[in-house]
């Protein structure tokens, strides 16, 4: 089964960015670990700081892949377009947030992704991506 992890803006800086909130590990290092642990899964990774590129990627994979693990980062709280993209495709989407957004500022409590996602994993650090991956396994 093909599964893609899609990360939104500023998540390319994981490891450097606010380590007190997001930890010290780069996403590449974490993704390496995931690939080694789940060799039976065809795992892909895409990151963009550009809203339209995230939507384009969802359209590209969203009729053939088995699952999308989506951390839309700040676009979670602003993007009607990404919310609509989930409704427009067939592939199920699991929403992930590294931090517990509900312990943070009020503006992070609203998500345009959640009403359209198949499930939501929040506040488990990078492990949330693995939990999302497991949710696609039979
Ligand atoms: C985040 C939470 C968002 O509020 C924030 O804008 C991010 C990362 C998380 O993974 O905790 O960039 O999605």
Image: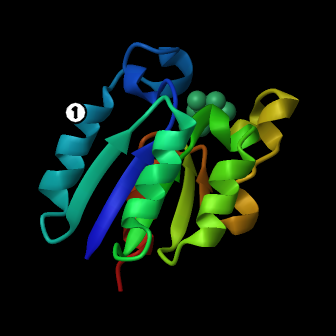
Residue at x 68% of width, y 60% of height: 84
Q: Secondary structure at mark 1?
A: helix
Q: Quadrant of residue 69?
A: bottom left
Seen in the picture, residue 75 relative to 58 is either above or below; the reply is above
Seen in the picture, residue 4 relative to 62 is either above or below; the reply is above
Q: Nearer the viewer, residue 108 or 130?
A: 108
Q: Quadrant of residue 117?
A: bottom right
Q: Quadrant of residue 44?
A: bottom left
Q: List x then y, in percent, for residue 113.
A: 68, 55
Residue at x 46% of width, y 41% of height: 53
Q: List x then y, in percent, for residue 22.
A: 50, 26
Seen in the picture, residue 36 relative to 87 is either above or below; the reply is above
Q: List x then y, in percent, for residue 51.
A: 56, 38
Question: Residue pushed farthest bottom?
Answer: 138
Q: Colour mode?
A: rainbow
In this rendering, the count of numbered labels is: 1
Question: Residue pushed farthest right?
Answer: 106
Residue at x 53% of width, y 41% of height: 52
Q: Residues within 10 Å of mark 1 (few under 14, many from 20)?
A: few
Q: Tell me, yes or no, if residue 12 can be seen here.
A: yes
Of the 4 image quadrants, the one containing the C terminus is: bottom left
Cβ of mark 1 under 8 A from ligand 1: no
Which residue position is annotated with label 1? 29
Is 115 situated left or right of 47 in this image? right
Residue at x 50% of width, y 37% of height: 8
Q: Tell me, yes or no, if residue 98 can be seen here.
A: no
Of the 4 image quadrants, the one containing the N terminus is: bottom left
């Amino acid at each position: 089964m093909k599964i893609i992890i899609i990360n939104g803006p500023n998540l390319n800086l994981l490891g450097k960015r606010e380590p007190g909130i997001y930890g010290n590990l780069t996403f590449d290092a974490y993704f390496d670990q995931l690939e080694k642990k789940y060799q039976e899964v065809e795992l892909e990774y895409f990151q963009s700081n550009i809203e339209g590129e995230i939507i384009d990627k969802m359209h590209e994979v969203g009729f053939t892949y088995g699952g999308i693990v989506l951390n839309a980062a700040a676009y979670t709280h602003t993007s009607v377009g990404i919310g609509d993209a989930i409704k427009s495709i067939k592939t199920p989407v699991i929403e992930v947030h590294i931090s517990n957004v509900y312990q943070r500022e009020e503006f992070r409590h609203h998500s345009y992704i959640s009403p359209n996602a198949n499930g939501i994993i929040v506040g488990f650090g990078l492990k949330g991506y693995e939990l999302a991956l497991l949710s696609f396994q039979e």
